[in-house]
Amino acid sequence: MRVGQLLRFRCSALRSSSSTGAGTARQQYVPQHKPAVEDDIKRLEDFLLSKPNVLVLTGAGISTESGIPDYRSEGVGLYARTNHKPIQHMDFVKSAAVRKRYWARNFVGWPKFSETLPNASHHALARFEREERVQAVVTQNVDRLHAKAGSKNVVEVHGSGYVVKCLSCEYRIERHEFQSILNSLNPEFMDAPDMVRPDGDVEIPLQYIENFRIPECPQCAGDLKPEIVFFGDSVPKARLDRIAEMVYTSDGLLVLGSSLLVFSGYRIVLQMKDLKLPVAIVNIGDTRADHLADIKISAKCGDVVPKLFDFRSSSSST
């Protein structure tokens, strides 16, 4: 089967699964968990009612229910399922071979990744923003699912996979447009065999990677990179300053789906506690900041967040 046909089939299957709710395909990356306790949901709702200017921090755990795997979850995370490790910033910058391998895999995986839809938790957070129940969302994710759900005040702390930038000048291009350029430069990829694996990972024969062509920056002939903060790189100072300002003007923090092992997220918790502000965490399993949390709920985000302030549900049950 041609890779184009295979990708179209998978995108069609993804749209079908989204229309019927959180089916098996979209739950395959959610680790084992216990059901949420109603008392915990009520306790979190009371927490948010008393603090209408809460800042929300989201991690990969909120997007696993949309079919995007995280790195660290036991049994279902990328570390557990594959030997492909996250790309390091300096490796990408210094090595043409690393850039070629990255862009080849990204090229094949992009149609499926970009078709991913927000889930009930993303939509609930967008509703909370419209109802002025939360101040803003700071996300560690690069999937743009908060924006797709309708959230307006979002800071992508690690950048976005939807923009490509030049490493040497200010050139930017939308990722969808860049995909068209890559398509035109690499027509032979239409015949590459079995490149998308059943678990969504990408397996590309070496000869295809070696022949993969990447355009130069049209302004300065520099190297192009997704506008993502790779491991080993630093979050831009302007972005950190904006997040710090949000922290200082908030009245608490709600962490959703993050283990907080990456310091860019953990830093926000520390800033909150320095200001003596409360922190609530919803995450499957332990986090780095459990000892600092005022509320910790060990549950799937989708079992908790959409039930908050869901007055339609409560009225129908009475």
Image (tube, helix red, strand yellow):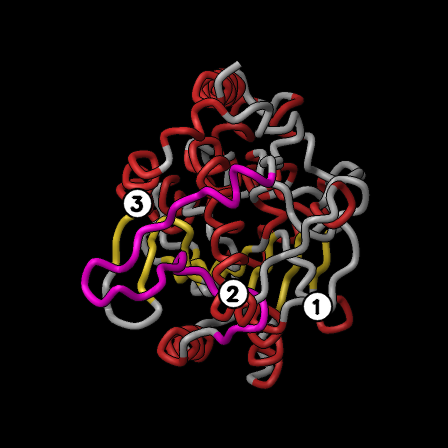
Task: Name the residue: 62% across, 73% down.
Answer: 263
SS assignment for the magenta stretch, majority: loop
Would residue 116 be counted in the magenta stretch? Answer: no
Q: Nearer the viewer, residue 179 or 296?
A: 179
Highlighted magenta segment, given as a residue range: 206-234
Q: Is residue 139 above or below residue 203?
A: below
Residue 121 visible (yes or no): yes
Instruction: Give the label on residue 114, or none.
Output: none
Q: Earlier in the sequence, mark 2 or mark 1?
A: 2
Q: CA distance from mark 1 to mark 3?
A: 42 Å
SS for callout 1: loop
Horizontal arrangement in the rendering, residue 38 relative to residue 128 (left or right): right
Point out the frontmost of discs 3 and 2. Answer: 2
Q: Earlier in the sequence, mark 1 or mark 3?
A: 3
Q: Inspect the image, locate mark 2, and give the three-letter code of the amino acid beneath it.
A: Ser
Q: Inspect the image, locate mark 3, and give the three-letter code of the amino acid beneath it.
A: Phe
The residue that label 2 is drawn on is 95
The residue that label 3 is drawn on is 178
Instruction: Give the label on residue 293, or none.
Output: 1
Q: Earlier in the sequence, mark 3 or mark 2?
A: 2
Task: Name the residue: 58% across, 36% down.
Answer: 204
- The location of residue 69, given as percent across then percent down, is 63, 42
Would residue 211 be counted in the magenta stretch? Answer: yes
Mark 2 and mark 1 in contact? Answer it, CB < 8 Å.
no
Task: Name the residue: 32% across, 61% down.
Answer: 165
Q: Nearer the viewer, residue 177 or 77?
A: 177
Q: CA distance from mark 3 to mark 2?
A: 21 Å
At label 3, counting other C-alpha atoms closer than 10 Å, the crowd grade (few under 14, some 14-19, many 20 or more) is: some
